[in-house]
Amino acid sequence: MDVVNHKKKLLLVGSKGMLAQKIAARAAGEWEIIAVDLPDFDLTDQAQVLATVQRLSPAVIINCAAFTNVDACESEEEVATRVNGSAVGTLAEAAHAASATLVHISTDYVFSGTGNTPLSEKDIVGPQSAYGRSKLLGEQSILTSRLEKFIILRTSWLYGPGGNNFVETIIRLAKQREKLGIVADQIGSPTYTGDLADAIFSILASDVDPYGIYHFSNDGACSWYDFALKIVDLARKNGENLKIKEIAPIRTEDYPLPAKRPAYSVFSKEKYCQLTGKSIPFWQDSLAKYFIER
Ligand SMILES: NC(=O)c1ccc[n+]([C@@H]2O[C@H](COP(=O)([O-])OP(=O)(O)OC[C@H]3O[C@@H](n4cnc5c(N)ncnc54)[C@H](OP(=O)(O)O)[C@@H]3O)[C@@H](O)[C@H]2O)c1
C-alpha cells in the first residue's frame, strides 16, 4: 500500500537564518518543509526561483532570506536592493504562478521613526537607511505583483537561537568589559523568534482570508539601554560569569554608525490580535524564555 503524505508543503527560503531555524522547528511535524538557502539557492537568481517554485509547487512560501547587515547595506545598496527588493518581486510572481501563499518578513526600518505613538500598518512609511529602502522595495514588489495571497509581516529587534543578535552581543561584551555605554534614545520592542514563528502559523491558521500587511513584535516597549540592563540581569540570574559593573545610557549621536536607525518604532499589533484572537507575550517574559533555551 502506498503511504500518502497529507502534510502541506512549506518552502522555507533563507532557511539557515536565525528566524528560519525557529520557523522550521515550529513547522516540523505538521508541514513538509523544503529548506533552501545560499549557496545552493540564490533568491536573486530569477530563473532558479521560478523553476524551484514551479517544480515544488508549495502551498506556502516563507521568505526569511535577506541582506540583514544594516550598516553594510549603506555601502552595498545595490546588492541590498537586489536581495531585499527586486528578488522578492520574482518570488511573488513565482508564488502567483504556483497558487502559493507568500509570507514575507519585513521590518520597522521602513518607517522614519520620528513619531511617538505606536505605528499601525496604515501609517506612512519613510525609510532612513539603505536597508530600510531595500526592504520597502521588497514590500512594494509584492504589492504591485499579481499575487493576492500574501502576508507581509513587519517585525523589530529580532533575537533567538542560532543568530547574531543584540542579546548575544551584550552577553559577550558583559563578559569582556566592566563598563558599557548603550543607546537610550531609541525606543522599540524586542521580538523573540519563537513568538514570531508562532505568530506566522497563527495568521496562516486563520478562518478568514488573512492576506495583507501585519505588525508583530513582543509586547511592551523599551530602549536599547533598558534591553541591555534586562539582558545582564537575566544573564547573572542564569549563572553567567560577567565582568560588567556599569551600563551607562548614551545618546545615538555618541555612538555613530553608518546606517540611521528609527528613534521610535513601537508597533501597534491590534490587527494581528484581532485576526488571531491571540495575546502577545511581554518582551521581558520572552527574554526569560530565551535564557532558559539558549
Ligand atoms: N534581525 C533583526 O533584528 C530583524 C528585524 C526586523 C526584521 N528582520 C527581517 O527578518 C527576516 C529574518 O531575519 P534574520 O535575522 O533571521 O536573518 P538572517 O539570520 O541574517 O538570515 C537570513 C538568511 O538569508 C540568507 N540569504 C542572504 N542572501 C540570500 C540570497 N540571495 N538567496 C538566498 N538566501 C539568502 C542568508 O544567508 P547568508 O548568511 O549566507 O548571507 C541567511 O541564511 C529578514 O527578512 C529580516 O530583514 C530582521
Image: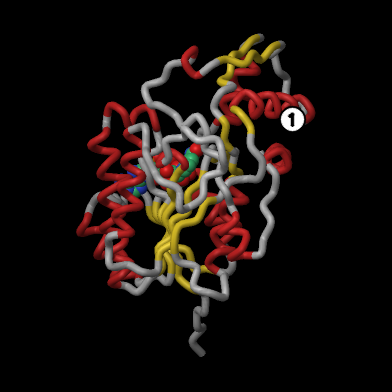
Q: How many marks?
A: 1
Q: Is residue 100 above or below residue 2?
A: above
Of residue 100 and residue 53, the one placed in the foreground of this image is 100
- Quarter for ligand 1? top left
Q: Is residue 172 left or right of residue 50?
A: right
Name the residue at 71% across, 18% down: 242
Camera-side residue: 118 or 180?
118
Residue 120 percent across, percent down from the top left: 51, 50
Decide if residue 42 is on the left or right side of residue 207.
Answer: left
Q: Residue furthest bottom?
A: 1
**Circle 1 sits on which residue?**
234
**Residue 34 in sight:** no
**Vertical relation: 31 (above or below) 62:** below
Identify which residue, 204 or 222, lies in the foreground.
222
Residue for point 74% across, 26% down: 233
Q: Residue at x 49, y 12 (%)?
A: 254
- Bin the neighbour count of mark 1 within 10 Å (Cα to Cα): few under 14, some 14-19, many 20 and up: some
| View extreme (left): residue | 47
Quarter where residue 145 is shown: bottom left
Percent coordinates x, y for residue 65 in the rendering: 39, 48
Ligand 1 near label 1 (Cβ, under 8 Å)? no
Q: Secondary structure at mark 1?
A: helix
Coloration mode: secondary structure
Residue 67 at what x, y percent from top left?
36, 39
The residue nearer to you, when weighing 213 against 233, is 213
> Is 293 on the left or on the right of 108, as rendered?
right
Identify which amino acid the numbered label 1 is placed on. Answer: Leu
Q: Quadrant of the C terminus?
A: top right
What percent of the width, then of the height, locates residue 158? 54, 40
